[in-house]
Image (cartoon, helix red, strand yellow):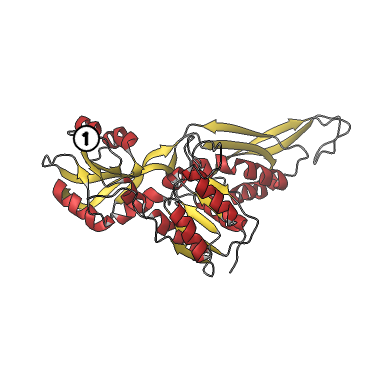
């Protein structure tokens, strides 16, 4: 089964919206192709070994967690490692897509799956995203209110947590005066008109604003549609950095380390000294989670599980909470399996494989 690149990228972007990525990130489609996609290969890092594997597998789409191009690429030459990889990808007509911090923060992204994997219960987002929500308000004749509301909801407006089709509606009277060249739905050009209307208010994510307004206008009977759009500081509760929740049972520090080794299939774990703490509430952040320590402490976490912790971080927070460094690679290696799982579920007859050459760049001797 062949798919268009647009089909695959549209699906991945719907699962892990690019708008969720950090400002410094570079997620999304970085190298395209006009050819139909015959097979995809998933990986954590796009190395030259992965590109060679893609060629051998006859896969013309590489899906990675880490971006191949982070900052501005000034040249594509053989003397530059990234340039070599980009050059070979283009020469072999392969597309490259990555989902990085948007994948980390998505409702069912990396951190969601990490929390599931270690059995956390009653989970919530550790640091929810902000500045992603808008309030959209419009004014509709009574008999068209249901049609306009439905159109807005169909464009994903009105979602609050686990609830959908949320809106607030107020009856009122609208006024307008059409000029001579207008063709008003009700009223007469040149005459002030009073119309019973319903004010509809709903909430919409930034990524869906344009689509929602378009659908609202299509369903609205007026020649000129009046609406207001307000940016909100409300948190997007199901989306953001990390997860925090309760372990299945209370553990001591040593038991937690053993538990994580088993659940995440990890051999080496670094942690702060055992102080005889009972661990019940845990925060987990895939990749580098040092910046989330403050949030974990404020929300009462007994432990933070992440990667890339520095020497002085262990020193500074030894008594604040139990810090557990499971490694950057170790906390993110499930990404390629997640990409594989969602693609094979969405497109059962499409060929997808997981890279076998994508190994931890850090070796422990």
185 lies above or below 96? above
Quadrant of the image containing the N terminus: bottom right
Which is nearer the eye, 113 or 97? Answer: 97
Residue drawn at x 70%, y 43% is 217
Residue linked to disc 1: 314
Residue 103 x %, y %: 45, 48
13 lies above or below 315? below
Task: Classify 10 Å Cα crowding around label 1: few (below 14), some (14-19), many (20 and above).
Answer: many
Residue 170 x %, y %: 60, 37
Which is nearer the eye, 363 or 218? Answer: 363
Which is nearer the eye, 243 or 164? Answer: 243
Asked whether the viewer can see residue 24, the reply is yes
Tell me if 21 is positioned left or right of 328 in this view: right
Residue 193 x %, y %: 79, 32
Secondary structure of residue under mark 1: helix
Residue drawn at x 51%, y 41% is 26
Residue 324 x %, y %: 23, 43
């Amino acid at each position: 089964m062949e798919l268009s690149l647009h089909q695959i990228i549209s699906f991945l972007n719907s699962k892990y919206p690019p708008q969720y990525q950090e400002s410094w990130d570079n997620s999304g489609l970085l190298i395209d192709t006009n050819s139909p996609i015959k097979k995809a290969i998933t990986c954590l890092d796009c190395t030259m070994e992965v590109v060679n594997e893609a060629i051998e597998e006859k896969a013309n789409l590489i899906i990675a967690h880490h971006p191949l191009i982070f900052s501005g690429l000034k040249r594509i030459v053989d003397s530059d490692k990234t340039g070599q990889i980009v050059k070979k990808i283009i020469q072999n007509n392969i597309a490259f897509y990555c989902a990085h911090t948007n994948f980390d923060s998505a409702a069912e992204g990396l951190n969601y799956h990490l929390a599931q994997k270690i059995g956390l219960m009653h989970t919530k987002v550790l640091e929810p995203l902000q500045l992603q929500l808008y309030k959209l308000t419009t004014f509709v004749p009574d008999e068209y209110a249901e049609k306009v509301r439905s159109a807005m909801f169909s464009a994903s407006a009105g979602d609050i947590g686990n609830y959908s089709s949320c809106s607030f509606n107020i009856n009122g009277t609208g006024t307008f005066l059409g000029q001579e060249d207008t063709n008003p739905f009700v009223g007469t050009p040149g005459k002030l008109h009073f119309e019973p209307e319903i004010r509809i208010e709903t909430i919409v994510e930034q990524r869906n604003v344009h689509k929602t307004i378009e659908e609202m206008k299509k369903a609205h009977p007026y020649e000129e549609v009046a609406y207001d759009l307000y940016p909100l500081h409300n948190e997007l509760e199901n989306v953001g950095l990390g997860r925090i929740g309760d372990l299945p049972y209370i553990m001591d520090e040593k038991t937690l380390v053993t538990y994580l080794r088993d659940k995440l299939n990890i051999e080496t774990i670094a942690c702060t000294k055992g102080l005889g703490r009972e661990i019940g509430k845990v925060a987990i952040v895939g990749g580098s989670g040092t910046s989330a320590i403050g949030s974990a402490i404020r929300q009462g976490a007994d432990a933070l599980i992440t990667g890339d912790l520095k020497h002085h971080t262990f020193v500074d927070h030894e008594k604040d909470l139990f810090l557990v460094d499971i490694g950057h690679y170790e906390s993110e290696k499930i990404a390629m399996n997640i990409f594989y799982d969602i693609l094979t579920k969405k497109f059962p007859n499409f060929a997808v494989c997981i890279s076998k050459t994508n190994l931890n760049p850090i070796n422990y001797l």
